[in-house]
Image (tube, rainbow, N blue to C red):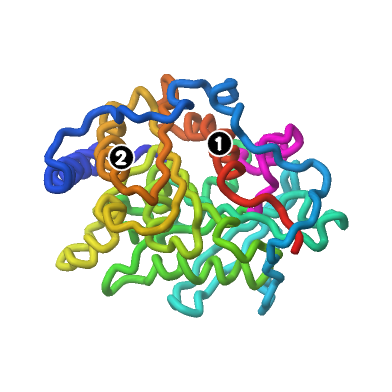
């Protein structure tokens, strides 16, 4: 998960400024309506006090309908063993998109606990930075350790046990020719694969929650772009999103000659037309002068959309580094716990 190249950043800066001028007619400035968590360190009372308590023992059943596995059953193999359980991998060929790509899955310990046999679990899809061509760094325990963080926070009553789904995003390593998590004409239909086929795969294989209130999407850098875009494009599936150090304008060279389609997949434009009740936490590091401009440009537009519930967090001394992305993981899990349903029986 590496920082985006200087040349690509400069390209994005021009695009962001152009889009902001067209949409808002004002410059990119620090957002004045930051959430109470802004400036609070990860794990500080301001950052964690409002997190919903997640159960450490099986919760009481409710009337929420569980989505039982529908099949067909995928061939899952163990990719790696971790201290908090195995991470599985499969190659998913999407029925709707026709795209074939790797998908990694982690199940929280509660999933196979007999006390939870009748429970559906909330799902988080995670997209990494860089090209994520054939890999997803959220599976890397040394770099991010999101699975161990979830187990630790669940034991403290600060986070729900989540099913974590970690797909690839591209098929070759190039910052200039990314799929942009979209159906770009003439390219693999990645938007459909991510927004339709992957949720269908999860529902086919695991006990989930039927309601969109049980589904969230997050990612860092390139994955941050994907998480914002997919939540806005598929609100029937996703209720909450956390773009970490992301950007908000599609800029792959594959869009050349397809400006209409590019605009249709532009989160900074999509958010102006959003009609869905969405919860979104946008984060950036305080040392990222350019990144803060990008985030401010998006938020200046997004905060005008009433159905979107927008929160903002600025990581003190944070930079565009994997080590800093990791510091936001506890807040991300707590945000999803606050805004998604917990494991529920029905």
Residue 80 or residue 49, whichever sits in front: 49
x and y percent of residue 35 in the render?
A: 43, 30
Image: 200 above or below 176: below
On whether residue 190 falls in the magenta region, the answer is no
Which one is earlier in the sequence, the residue at label 2 or at label 1?
Answer: 2
x and y percent of residue 202 in the render?
A: 61, 66
Query: Tags 2 and 1 in contact by the CB under 8 Å rule?
Result: no
Residue 122 seen: yes
Under circle 1, the secondary element is helix
* Crowding near the residue tagged with mark 2, few <14, some 14–19, many ≥20 C-alpha atoms within 10 Å: many
The residue pinned by badge 1 equals 329
x and y percent of residue 93 in the render?
A: 52, 75
Q: Residue at x 48, y 51 (%)?
A: 127
Q: Which residues are magenta?
A: 145-163
Q: Which mark is residue 164?
A: none
- Marks 2 and 1 sit apart, C-alpha to C-alpha, by 21 Å
Under circle 2, the secondary element is helix
* Crowding near the residue tagged with mark 1, few <14, some 14–19, many ≥20 C-alpha atoms within 10 Å: many
Closer mark to the observer between disc 2 and disc 1:
2
Q: Residue at x 38, y 71 (%)?
A: 189
The residue pinned by badge 2 equals 299
x and y percent of residue 56 in the render?
A: 79, 41
Q: Quadrant of the C terminus?
A: bottom right
Residue 130 seen: no
């Amino acid at each position: 998960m590496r920082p985006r190249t200087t040349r690509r950043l400069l390209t994005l800066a021009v695009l962001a400024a152009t889009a902001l001028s067209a949409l808002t007619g004002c410059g990119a400035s620090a957002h004045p309506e930051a959430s109470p968590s802004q400036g609070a360190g990860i794990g500080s009372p301001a950052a964690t006090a409002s997190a919903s308590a997640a159960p450490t023992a099986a919760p009481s059943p409710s009337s929420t309908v569980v989505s039982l596995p529908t099949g067909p059953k995928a061939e899952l193999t163990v990719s790696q063993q971790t201290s908090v359980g195995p991470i599985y991998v499969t190659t998913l060929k999407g029925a709707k998109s026709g795209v074939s790509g790797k998908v990694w899955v982690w199940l929280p310990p509660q999933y196979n606990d007999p006390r939870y046999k009748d429970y559906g679990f909330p799902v988080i899809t995670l997209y990494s930075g860089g090209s994520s061509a054939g890999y997803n760094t959220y599976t890397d325990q040394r770099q991010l350790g999101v699975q161990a963080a979830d187990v630790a926070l669940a034991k403290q009553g600060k986070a729900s046990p989540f099913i974590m789904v970690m797909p690839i995003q591209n098929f070759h390593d190039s910052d200039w020719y990314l799929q942009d998590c979209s159906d770009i004409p003439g390219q693999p239909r990645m938007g459909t694969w991510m927004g339709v086929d992957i949720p269908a795969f999860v529902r086919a294989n695991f006990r989930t929650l039927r309601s969109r209130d049980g589904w969230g999407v997050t990612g860092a850098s390139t994955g941050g772009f994907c998480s914002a875009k997919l939540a806005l494009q598929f609100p029937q599936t996703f209720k909450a999103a956390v773009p970490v150090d992301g950007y908000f304008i599609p800029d792959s060279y594959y869009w050349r000659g397809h400006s209409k389609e590019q605009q249709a997949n532009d989160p900074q434009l999509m958010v102006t037309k959003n009609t869905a009740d969405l919860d979104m936490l946008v984060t950036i590091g305080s040392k990222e002068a350019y990144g803060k401009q990008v985030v401010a440009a998006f938020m200046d537009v997004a905060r005008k959309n009433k159905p979107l519930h927008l929160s903002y967090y600025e990581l003190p001394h944070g930079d565009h580094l994997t080590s800093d992305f990791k510091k936001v993981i506890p807040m991300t899990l707590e945000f999803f716990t606050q805004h998604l349903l917990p494991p529920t029986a029905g």
